[in-house]
Image (cartoon, coloured by chain):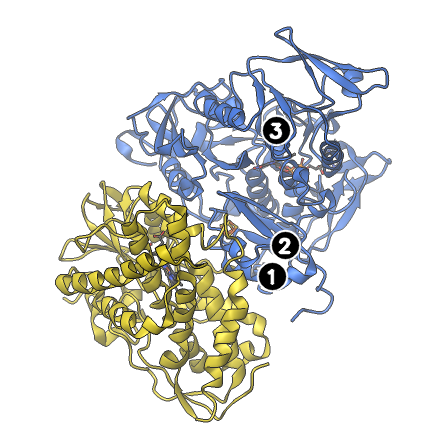
Chain colours: A yellow, B blue
Amino acid sequence: MSCPFHLVLDPSSRANPYPLLNELRDTPVALQDDGTYVVSTYREIVALLHDPRISSGRRTLDRTPAFIGLDPPEHDRLRRLAMRHFGPPHAPDKIDRLRPDMLAITTELIDNLAGKQRADLVDEVAYPLPVAMICRLLGVPREDESQFHAWADRLIELLSPRDEHRAERQEVADKLDDYLGGLVDERRHKPGDDMLSGFIADGEMTRDEIVRTGVLLLIAGHETTINLIANGMLTFLRRPDVLVRVHDDPELIVPAVEELLRYEPPVQMISSRVALEDVTVGGVTIPAGSPIVLALAAGSRDPDHVTDPDTFSLDRPRNEHLGFGGGIHYCFGAPLARLEAQIVLTELVRRLYNPRLVADPPPYRPSPILRGPRHLWVDYDEVFPAR
Amino acid sequence: MSRPGTADLVRVVVDLTRCQGYGQCVFLAPEVFRMREEVLLYDLDPPAGRRDHVLRAAAACPVQAIHLDWRESRNLPETKPGGSTYEGRIVIVGGSLAGARAAGTLRREGFTGPLTVISEEEGEPYDRPPLSKQVLTGQVAPENTRLPRLREVEVEWLAGTPATGLDVAAKKVLLADGREIPFDRVLLATGTRARPWPDEAEAKLKGVHTLRSAQDAAGLREALAAGPKRVLILGAGFTGSEIASVCRELDLPVTVVERGSAPLVSALGGVIGDVAAELQRAHGVDLRCDTTVTSLEGDADGRLRKAHLSDGSTVEADVAVVALGSVRNVEWLEGSGLAAGVWGVTCDAGCRAVDINGLVLDDVFVAGDIARFPHPLYQYQFMTLEHWGNAVAQAEIAAHNMISDQAHRWPHVSVPVFWSSQFGVNIKSVGVPTFADEIAVTQGSTAGHRFVAAYGYQGRITAAVTFDQGMWLEHYQRLIEQAAPFPSENATPVRVPEKLSATAEATVVVTGHDPAERRVSLLLPGGRTS
Ligand SMILES: Cc1cc2nc3c(=O)[nH]c(=O)nc-3n(C[C@H](O)[C@H](O)[C@H](O)COP(=O)(O)OP(=O)(O)OC[C@H]3O[C@@H](n4cnc5c(N)ncnc54)[C@H](O)[C@@H]3O)c2cc1C
Ligand code: HEM
Ligand code: SF4
């Protein structure tokens, strides 16, 4: 018997995992043959995201993780220190003030699509914007991009809810650490107005903590938003009615991005959890020590939580989705990702005349966790000038 | 792009019982939402130019706790198809939080008959929690606290005239101006008022305030802005403590006099009260516990000058706030035959009023601060809750039940949730903390003012309190609903004044998530449920 979760992981289901995810929900808490529990219904996922007996500290590498892999009180301490230079309460308008920059970079990227009739929206738009923004925030020189891009991509490719490719992951992770470590040492002598310099100036994180936080933000900051943007254009191009509505009423981009996070979530599952004690959820007792996978993408399409879950709708009265997780690990960069996606998608919809998908489904990146198209080839007649 | 005729209107209210402090709203509309640790303060009536920011913020809230004026929520929940067929005439007495929410719910549930709201206060309903927070600091003007209208509600609004009587047999509400308003079903939602200082002459001294209405808040704000030499606060419950917090934020010297052993004791018990006391003192409050004010003294102009305390000392102050709790607005129900008194208006779990014989009335409903209802999770004891979240939840249940037949009525069994913000800390509670004999800090530490404490009664979790740890609250709510075992490690006696005390043993669990499916079952020996 082939279990649905096993099939979800298989590359052949990358283009459309949703029928399998729907099947997965028939067993809300499903024990796998390797002892992992996969949780796929909305309420059960939310319950575990808020359960202090569930740890994020499932170690897959021999190193202290960044705060995404830590539990309170360490998690809270490091996340708060990082937040000081990113958002409220200390820097409430930092991300809001980046809007003009986001628009300027977007405009430039889309200007570059003019003069031809076909583009790969992944490589030419969805990837460069988030990278530019996170580099600017962190203080990572954009010239180094090709260097860390390869490592970050490889790390994501190797991500899997099963404990595979350990040695290679370790090796790539070490390279990223060394790279960021070098940057931190530079900033110590030549501070800028970036986050790394801020962490150093605060003097409350050790060098290692700064490096790990920097690597986390660098990877999380560009391997996810890329998928949100690409999934967004893909969804719009598959649904001309949606495309027309967003084009005619740009305010609709706000509910559209929330719906994308629900309907085509860039982070399909969280695989870092482990039970610290026996925890009963959905009538199943997960024994202490068991690895847990939270199937966010399945939970956000749970018919017990949303009506018409398999329909992409701009008209949901309240859209509570699991796209950014929940509880204390709720995505740190969510506001940045939201604004980037809102701006890029608005501009693409407005400026590309008569866009069409070249291949449907497009080729996908291999990771079942951070899921998105590897390329999104689109034909169009013309690029309208920026406003 | 603004819709015609709406450009100037973006009223906001945040359901802070739901809010978990994710701060997404602050990121996306930093001019409207402000956050200090987990304390969220916001403009209820932001300038029109902020409209698109507010829309983004509301869409981004992970728990959808931000409510906007119905004209801004383009995706209104549809009126329920096949909704109610009830066609009688409905009257709501009290047009504030509970009354207004009930009116909206009646329409949402498909009630199309005549609907009248009788409200003593003039003007549109407004939100009270900001009155002791953003309004007193000056961040928000008292008149800018009007509640967003969550939907267009066709209703006859009789404002500015209090009801003076209820004739249950003749089905009429009597108004102060002599009018008689007939009803088929009526909802009583007249709430509470501030308990005045008992000595009338002293209460009239200039500089002596209470705080319940927007008008009260305007007066107190003016007094605080004038820079008094010292503010005296009588009572360290939530309201008194919040006002003290504002005074310190405004750098005003403040003395708080509390009869109990610590602030918040009657709501949260002595263990947490001690933490609150330490918090107050750390912020420079002159806190006098186990002490009462015996009299207030004025000068020749009738201005407050000083107060005499039970320990023989005096405090010189030119502003005093009497924060000694509230009085329920039940006087108008005298002679109505309802089981109404200082404790509130008694009703069943379906919000139907009970008469003095203990009989349930089918056409008289009660909701909000005035309601005294039995809660299955707390051994069916009757309780009144002066909580924003309870007013909303109970109003929705009452409204639903008013237009439903017996088979489709819902019980009001939501677990109480409360929040308060003071001294930069967001304090939240779930359950009934006074229904407990033990308490244990389960996460964080009280010394750092970031922690979760669980309350237990006879081995089961009955409540939890968080200081800046709001994200964990729903986990504890689940434990309470499941009557989960209380963790016995680190437990200490809770030291609560006996307000709700346990009687017979009836442990129940609550199942279901939507109001429509929430039900109670008795927990039988061996963990089975009935
Ligand atoms: C300063 C302050 C701060 C608060 N902070 C918090 C907080 O942080 N968290 C929290 O959970 N809760 C808080 N609350 C409590 C919350 O505001 C109340 O629970 C809520 O307002 C109750 O709503 P209600 O509609 O039942 O009663 P009310 O809001 O009291 O409304 C009753 C209405 O009925 C009217 N009325 C009275 N008698 C008559 C009559 N005879 N005829 C006609 N109309 C009449 C009144 O004028 C009033 O408009 C606070 C309250 C105050 C005053
Ligand atoms: C669309 C884009 C994004 C999506 C869908 C997304 C999704 C998520 C999810 C689901 C989590 C929860 C992980 C867990 O609970 O273990 C998370 C955490 C995190 N995200 Fe994002 N993310 C996105 C963009 C970003 C960006 C742009 C940044 C950086 C600026 C970022 C930084 C982080 C960090 C640091 C965490 C860990 C938070 C913690 O552990 O407290 N993310 N993200
Ligand atoms: S939970 Fe919602 S309302 Fe509360 S801070 Fe977060 S975004 Fe704002």
Are tags 1 and 3 found on a single chain?
yes
**Which structural element holds mark 2?**
loop
Residue B150 circle label: 2
Badge 2 local density, few (<14 within 10 Å), some, or many (20+)?
many
**Which structural element holds mark 3?**
helix
Nearer the N terminus, badge 2 or badge 3? 2
Which circle, 2 or 3, is nearer the viewer?
3
Residue A140 in percent (x, y) is at 36, 65
Are tags 2 and 3 found on a single chain?
yes
Callout 1: chain: B
For badge 2, the amino acid type reads: Leu
Q: Is A303 above or below relative to B223?
A: below
- Distance of mark 2 from mark 3, alpha carbons? 33 Å
Callout 2: chain: B
Q: Could you tell whether B169 is left or right of B41 in the image?
A: right
Residue B73 circle label: 1
Residue B228 in percent (x, y) is at 72, 27
Residue B244 circle label: 3
Are tags 1 and 2 found on a single chain?
yes
Contact (Cβ within 8 Å) of mark 1 with mark 2: yes
- Distance of mark 1 from mark 2, alpha carbons? 8 Å
**Res B188 visible:** no
Which circle, 1 or 3, is nearer the viewer?
3
Residue B26 in percent (x, y) is at 53, 53
